[in-house]
Amino acid sequence: MADTADAARTGGAPEHVGEETAVRLIGARSSSLVVGVGAAKGVSVDEVFELVEGVLAEVGLDSVDCVVALATLDTKAAEPGIVGAAERLGVPVLVYSAEELAEVPVPNPSDASLTAVGTPSVAEAAALAGGGELLVPKRKSKGADGAPGRVTCAVVRRPVRAPWRRGAWAT
């Protein structure tokens, strides 16, 4: 099996990634990735950052450099773990209301999320709210010592605007 890091450096994808995903991942290298994040209160910067980094590595991207923003629910925008992870990544945090997120169709809605925060999805909906293609559906962190994880993330690829063509999207 191809090494994930080697595949990412050479523009390929690891063998365990399907052909359709591999084509999308190669396109991701020339695109902007937005990572939607859902988190429990008091989550650590490390748990958020490690989940994002791990999910990108899992699909063959060995660098967080293609991440242009984290996106989340407005009530989570000041959560130190999310803010700190965004600072570590050097990206802004995009914020959406529960009402906005509830209108975004997602592949993995959650009754627990709907009950807790008023939207059936935070990570996937926040990632998808600004448009784009879902590259990685919701993933959940693993807690220490077998405890349940407290962070979810999903990754969306958005086309990069071509700076030389006003209003056009590069594909």
Image: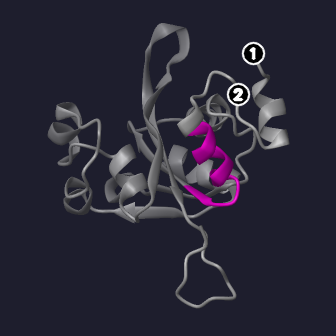
The residue carrying mark 1 is 1
* 73 lies above or below 124: below
**Where does the magenta region start and end?**
21-33
> Marks 2/1: CA distance?
7 Å
Q: Main secondary structure of the magenta part?
A: helix
Q: Residue at x 38, y 56 (%)?
A: 128
Q: Decide which of 123, 32 is in the foreground and name it.
A: 32
Residue type of the residue flagged with mark 1 = Met
- Residue 121 in sight here: yes
- Residue 48 in sight here: no
Residue type of the residue flagged with mark 2 = Pro
Q: Are marks 2 and 1 in contact (CB under 8 Å)?
A: yes
* 12 lies above or below 32: above
Locate residue 85, reporting x and y percent.
Answer: 61, 47
Residue 118 in the figure: left or right of residue 55: left
Whether residue 103 appears in magenta in the rendering, the answer is no
Q: Residue furthest bottom?
A: 166
Q: Residue furthest front?
A: 19
Q: Residue at x 68, y 33 (%)?
A: 57
The quarter in which the C terminus is drawn is: bottom right
